[in-house]
Amino acid sequence: MTNDVLAKQLAGLPVKLLHHLARKRVPRHFRMGKNRLIQTLLALSPDQQAEIETSLASLLQEPARSPDLPKPPDTPSRPSPPRHNVPAEPAPAISTKELFEGIGVPPQRPFKPDDWQQEAINHLATNDVILSVPTGSGKTYVALEAMRRAIEAEQTIIYTSPLKALSNTKLTEFSQTFGSDQVGILTGDRRDNPQAPILIMTTEILRNLLYDAASGEIDMRLDTLGLIILDESQFLADRERGVVWEETIIFAPAQSRLLLLSASIGNPDEVAAWISSIRSTSCHLIHHRNRSVPLRAAYLDPSGKLAPFFRTRDIAHGKGVALHPETKRLFANYEDRTLGPRKR
Amino acid sequence: MPPAIHPVDLLQALRHQRLTPAIVFLTSRRACDEAIDSFEHRHVSIPATRSAAITHVLEKMTAEYPSIADHPLIPTVQHYGVAAHHAGHLPSWKIAVEELMRQGCLDAVFATTTLAAGVDFPARTVVVTQSSVRKDRDIMELTVNEIQQLAGRGGRRGKDYVGFVVVTPSPYIDLGPIANGLTNHPEPIDSQFLLSYPMVLNLLKAHTVDHIQPILEKSFAQFQINQRADRYETKLDEVETQLEAYGQRECADWITQWQSFTLAKKRRSHHRLKTRHDPPEVSAQLAFLTPGRVVELSKDHAIVLRQYRSRGQGYAMLTVIRSGGQIVEYPANTITAVIDEIIDVAEARKFPWCTPHSLKHAIETLENFPTRLRRLPIRVDQDGTDSPVLTEMLSHEFPCPTCPARPACQKDHPQALKLRQEDHRLTKTIHALRTELWHRFQQHVEVLQKFGYLTPACQLTPEGDWARLIRINHSLLITELIRMGAFEGISASLLAGVLASIAHDDDRPASFPGRHPALISTLGQVRKVAHSLSAYEEPPLLRWDIAAIADLWIGQPTLPWSEFIRSTTMAEGDLYRLLARTLEYLSQLHGLRSTHPGLADSARDAMDRMRRDVLQELP
C-alpha cells in the first residue's frame, strides 16, 4: 500500500480510531489533532507502517464497539452480600392504644417533697445550690421553702427573673403564699413595698443595686440579705444579657446564699465548679433528668390520625432513638404530598 | 391536602383522645391570631357551664386589671375555650390567659415558640409544629435546650398522670431535630461576657485599676477560658518534653543557627539553583546522553534520540527508541546505566527526531544487541551539594560547614523546627487567652479616657461619676448627648420621644401618627452624634415614627389607650413594651438629679405623664 492510499484511508476514519492506532507507537498522540496525527503515523518506520495497515484492516472488518456500551445482559450480576450488621430484633413498636393508656387526673395526695428537693433545702443552709432539673418538676417548691426558712431567720430575700412578665406572676404567687405585705417588687422606675422581706426584681436591677453597694451608696439592706434566688439562670448564656448574670454572681454578698434555678443544661457541673471557685462556700449541684410527670410523644397527621412518635411509650434518653414505623410512614406521605410537585 | 392541620381539627383530635388542655406552639403571632379566628368560622362552641366559669374568672381578673374589660378577644375565649398568648398582647391580657389556664378553663392556648421562656404555665399536652425558628432574620434550627423548654410545659404535677408532646407537621418541620431534641442531652452553655462602658465605670468607681484584673478573673468567661488554656498547657508540656531531646549542641541555639545557615546557602546559590534541579547522579550522566548513545532502561536497552528539558519544571528528559521500535519519552533519572556504545543517528528537527533511514538502522541494531554490554563508569561527585566557593564564602559567617555536629543537625532539623514552632504557637495562644478579658477591658478604658470619663490614672472624672449611673444600652450615646446639652430645655414629650427611638431596637414596620418638625430636627442631630460614635458603640435604629408614637402618648394626656392603639399599626403588646422601656430609660435620667436637676425634672415630668391607663396597672 502506498502512502497516499493509506493517508486517504486514515483520513476517512474517526479520530478516535486514529488514536487507537497511534497508541504505543506515537508518544503524546493524545495531544495531536487529526491532520498532525495522520502525518505522524505516515512518518513512522516502514515496519511500523505495515503493522498499522494490518491492524487497520482488522478494525475495519469488525464494527467498532464503543467502550461505554452497557454490559451484555448475560453476565451474572453479583449477588448482594448478606447483611451482617442487622441489629438484634427490636422490641415490637407500641400501638396507639397503648400510648394513650392511663391519661387522667391523679387523686389528691398530701404533698411530700422529693428527696432531691429536701437535699437542696438542707444544703442551702450552708452552701450555694444550683438546681438543673426539667421544667415543671418542682423547682418552685424549693424556692418557696428556702424563702420560708430565710424569713424565719429574719433575712432579706431577693428573687430575680429575666422577664418583667415573670416577675408579675411571681409577685402574685408569693403574695398568695406569704401574704402581700411580705412581698415587694422593684422595677426601674417603681418600688412597691420595698421594706418587705421578699423582693422581686429583674436581674438587671439587682446588678445595679450591687454596683451601688460596691461604690458605697447603699440604699438597700444588703447586710441582711440572706438568700438570692436567680430564676431561669440558663440566661447566663444569653448573647446580650448573659453578662448580667455573671456580674450578679460575682458581686453577690459573701454572707448570702445563692440559689440558681435552671432548666436542664448540658454543663451544670461546670457552672457549679465556677461558683465554688469564686465564692467562700462550695456550690452544691442538684441535677437530674427525671420528670415528676412522665412525658410521652405522639405524632398527629394533618388527616387527624394519631400515632406514637417513638417505638417506645416513654421518651428514652440517648442518641439514635427510633421513630415509630407508623409515624415514619405518615410523615413520608406528608412530605411526598407537600414537597413532591416542587421537586419534579 | 393543606400543609398543616386546621386548628379546629387539631383541637378536635386532641379532645377525642382527652389530650386537652394543650399549649400549641406556632411560628408567628399572626399564625396564633389566625388560629383563633378560624374558630369563629366553624362554630364549635363549648358548653354554657364552662363559658360561665370563664366569665367568672375574667370578671375577677378585670377587677384587678381594668384594661381586660373590653378586650376584643373575650367573646372568642368565652365561646370556644381557646386563647392566643404572644408578645403582641398586653401583659394584663397574658396574665388573664395564664390564670384561665391554671383554673383549667381553656382547652388550648396558641402561643409563639419565640416566647417559650415567658410561657410559665403547664398543660397536659404541648403541640409542636416546627423544628426551626426565625431569629434576627435567620432561620435557625431549635436547639435541644429550646425543644426541652417547649416539651417541659407538658404534664402538670398533681393534675396529670402523664404529659404529652404532640408533633404535627407544618411547612417548618423536620422530625429529626425534634426527635433529637426530645431524647438527647441538652447543649452546654457558654459564657457571653460582653463588656460595656457603664460596667467599666462602675468597676473603676468601686475599685482601683490594680484590682480589676482579679475581678475579671472571677468571671465565668475566664473560668471557661482557663479550662481551654489548661488543655493547651498540657499539650505544651508534651511538646516541651519532646523538645528536650533537641537541646544544646555545639552552639546554644542550634535550630536557629542551622536555619539561618541553610537560608544563607539557599540565597547565595540562588542563581545556580534556578538552572539546575538535577541530582548529582543525573547531572553527571547528562554529558554522555547524546543522540545515538545506548542506555540501559530497567532490563532493556534503548538508544537516545534527543535530550531536552521538560517545559514545566525543567527536568532533564530523553526521547529514546526501545527494542520493538517504540519511541518513548523518559525523565533522565530513569536511566539505570549508560552503555559504552554510540551508534550513528542522523538527527532531525521533527518527530521521530531522526531520519527514517537512521530510525530503521537503530531498530535493527537494537534487535541485534547482546544482552550484556559494557557499562560506562561515571564518577558522581557525591559531596557536590555545596560548591567549594560557596562553602568558603559561608564559613566566614557560620561555624556549620566545619562543625562536628553538622550531620546531626542536618538530620534533626526538620523535626526540631516543627516542635519549636508548635511550642511558640501554643505559648502565644495561651497568653492571648489568659489576657483576653483584660485586653478588652483596656480597650474600653481607652475609649472612656478619650471622651473624658476617666483620668489617665483610670479614676472617674466628674463626668464619669454621673455617667456610670446610665446603665442601659447605648449609654455612651446618651451620656454624650447629655454633655452636649442636647436635652436642655426640650419638652418632656420630645425627651421621651428621643429616648423611645434610642430604646427601640425592633425593625417591625409601623405606621406613624403624623410628622412633627421639632422631633425630626432633634432626631437628625441625635443621628449625627450616634454616627460619630459608631466606632465605639453600635448606633441605635433611631426611628422617627417610634419617637412620634411615644411623643403622642405623652403629648396628649387625655388620650385613652384604646384610641392610642388605633393611631398606629403596632401591636399593643409592642406599644406597651416600647413605653415601658422608655420609662426605664427616663428613670435612669431621673437618677441624675444631683448633677443635672433640670434634666431629671423633665424626665420625672415625662414619667408622670406616661404612667396612666394601662401603664399604671402593673409595677
Image (tube, rainbow, N blue to C red):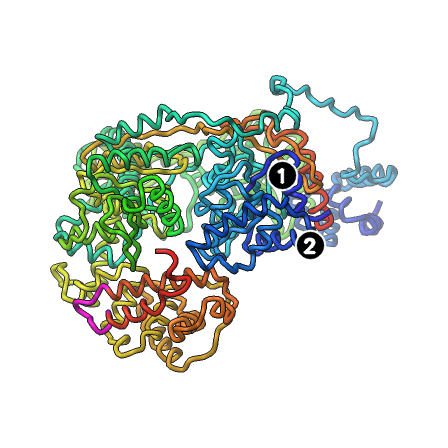
Residue A66 in the image: x percent, y percent? 79, 40
Residue A274, percent across and down? 27, 36
Nearest-to-viewer mark from 2 and 1? 2
Give the crowd class for mark 2: few <14, some 14-19, many >=20 residues within 10 Å: few
Residue type indicated by callout 2: His
What range is drawn magenta here? B591-600
Residue toward you, B483 or B33: B33
Q: Which mark is residue A194?
A: none
What residue is shown at x 69% (from left), y 44% (from top)? B357
- Say whether residue B524 is visible: yes
Q: Give percent across and percent down for residue B530.
A: 33, 70
Q: Residue at label 2?
A: B41
Q: Which residue is mark 1?
A: B321
**Residue appearing at x 27%, y 65% in the figure:** B476
Horizontal side of A25 relative to B487 (left or right) equals right
Quadrant of residue B72 within the rendered picture: bottom right
Instruction: Say left or right for A225 vs B123.
Output: left
Label 1 marks a residue whose chain is B
Q: Are marks 2 and 1 on the same chain?
A: yes
Quadrant containing the N terminus of chain A is top right
Q: Secondary structure at mark 1?
A: strand
Confirm whether the magenta stretch covers residue B467.
no
Q: Residue furthest bottom?
A: B517
